[in-house]
Amino acid sequence: MDTTHASRLMPGRDFGARAVARKAVRSGRFRTLPSLRLSVVLPSLVLATMLACAFLPNVLAPYGITDMDNDAILSPPTQHHWFGTDHFGRDIFSLLVFGAERSLVMATGTVLIAAGLGGTLGLVIGYVGGAADFVLMRLVDVWMSVPQILMAIIIATALRPSVGHTIMAVGLVLVPQFVRVMRGKVIAVRARPFIEASRSIGTGHATILFRHVLPHTLAPMFVMVTLGMAIAILLGSVLSFIGIGVIDDRPDWGFLLSQGRDYVTVAWWFPTFPGLAITALVVSINTLANKLKAHLTP
Amino acid sequence: MLFVTRRLLAACGVILGTITLVFFILYWLPGDPAALIAGDDASVAMVANIRAKLGTTAPLWQQYITYLVHLAHGDFGTSFTTNEPVWHRLAAQLPATLQLTFCASLVALTLGLTFGMLAAVNRDGWLDHFLQTLSMFFTSMPSFWMGLLLILIFSVGLRWLPAVGSGSFRQVILPALCLGLNVSAWLSGMVRNSVIEVLEEPFITTLRGKGLRERQILATHVLRNALIPLVTMFGLLAGELISSTVVVETIFARQGLGRLLVESVGVKDIPVVMGVTIFASGVFVLINLLVDLSYLWIDPRIKA
């Protein structure tokens, strides 16, 4: 706001001093701590909370997974049950705390498969080029021509339901994206003069690939890994929601949400909070991934 | 002409590859699809019976050739649960899905273009930041949760619209909104970047120098140029649209291909699962082919 203009409009109030103070805040110490902005702090806090839930569920959850409160079946949020209870009288907040582990295992496992397989393939075919590159990229085209959810559904259908298989299904769906990012970066790096210089002094291909090419691909791969985690959580929860994911006694956010769907007309809290947990985690990961991307690729 | 022929051939190759991939995932990956269909507590005779019906007694490559030959004649196989031709079941569900995707595309285009333009014009202003945050939320939200929230607000809370079913126009509003909001969030981000890129072109400065009004520049010059890269994006978003249909139709208990897929997965009706997947992928490839070909018309330099 223009200070003089505002003072003229409202002569009784001291806009000048405030503006000076605001200016000091803007240009002063606070400016030197850009990492402390809300858009970084908030998602980091959410992520830290999720990690704490995954590692210490017994400490953080007020109730156990199988604790059923018969007097409070489908109870709305109260001071005893912050997020209400489900159709068995189980505490939804506690179920969500115990479910965090599944989501994080899902995200990590999936990205390990996708980055391991896709990253290696992209690194090799990007460097080797030629026929291998051509053939594999056509395969990637075919792989990507099946929409993601459909691909995850048919792989999960073909395999027996288990945590490992769900992770494998979603991981395989994400492989082509990692191949593309890795290959593109490798081709760009390969064309740079220092690679040719390295070759001319007799460095072997393997050394060039791992010592000189690979380090340059780490930044975009890191961003891709973060984004991949977000996609993995969403796809995994879709599989649980449809009912072809893992169904065992461990709570799972997607599965909780699908159970809550049957009670949407009588217990709004039942589907709302599991969905909120998934959204909070995915938004946080995506926000951090975008910040990383802006930071790593100027 | 060379461009067209090459693209057509490539698309045919991709479709053939897709059929092969889907076939091997569903028939080879589980080991014995008959055992998968029968379930864990089926007798040996039952499994053998299903195997004969499914035609999986023959070697895998022979089954594959047979499937391709049948498909070439428009035969997608026979549904396991209803014994109808798979194609009939697909055709019966197609209109509901087309209605949903058409309405959702309208929602997505209207919201995506409007909000994308608004964000670009107010670049780095509060409206831009607000819209970007909003779009981040909508892209990160599982579409099935958004569907449930819409039901909670508009059906349970306000009682304005029916929550489930298909057929009437009122029943398509919520599902179309759910699907459209999701896609519009992706779209608005792309529109924003595309418009900003055009706004930085020198010819915009020329137009301003000529004294044209900002609104006129936006409507006639910026939008037209910004739309060119967006055509490609539409091809990519089609995949997102098809994917989300599966979930949205299930939430709102609508008729449609996605619902058919989820139901068939539940009862392990492999021929139908395969039919829907191949059909949806074929449509996806076809849309991307059309997008490629539309460049001939949009950008004449490609002809060379």
Image (tube, coloured by chain):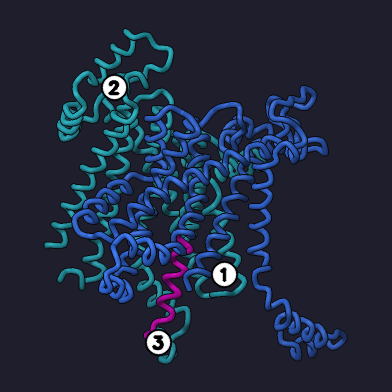
Query: CB of mark 3 within 8 Å of CB of mark 2?
Result: no
Residue at horizontal 51%, vertical 75%? B121
Which chain is in cyan here? B
Disc sitting over residue B84 in the figure: 2
Q: What residue type is labelled 2?
A: Glu
The residues colored magenta run: B187-203
Q: Residues within 10 Å of mark 1 (few under 14, many from 20)?
A: many
- Disc 1 versus disc 2: nearer the observer: 1
Find disc 3 in the rendering and name its residue: B207
The chain holding disc 2 is B
Q: Split into 4 quadrants, where in the image is the N terminus of chain B?
A: bottom left
SS under mark 1: helix
The chain containing the residue under callout 3 comes to: B
- In depth, the one of A241 and A110 nearer the eye is A110
Nearer the observer, disc 1 or disc 3?
Answer: 1
Mark with earlier residue (1, 2): 2
Amino acid type shown at disc 3: Leu
The Cα–Cα distance between marks 1 and 3, rounded to whole angstroms, is: 24 Å
Asked if one can make out residue B10 in the rendered structure from this viewpoint, the answer is yes
What's the distance in space between the residues labelled 1 and 2, CA to CA?
Answer: 53 Å
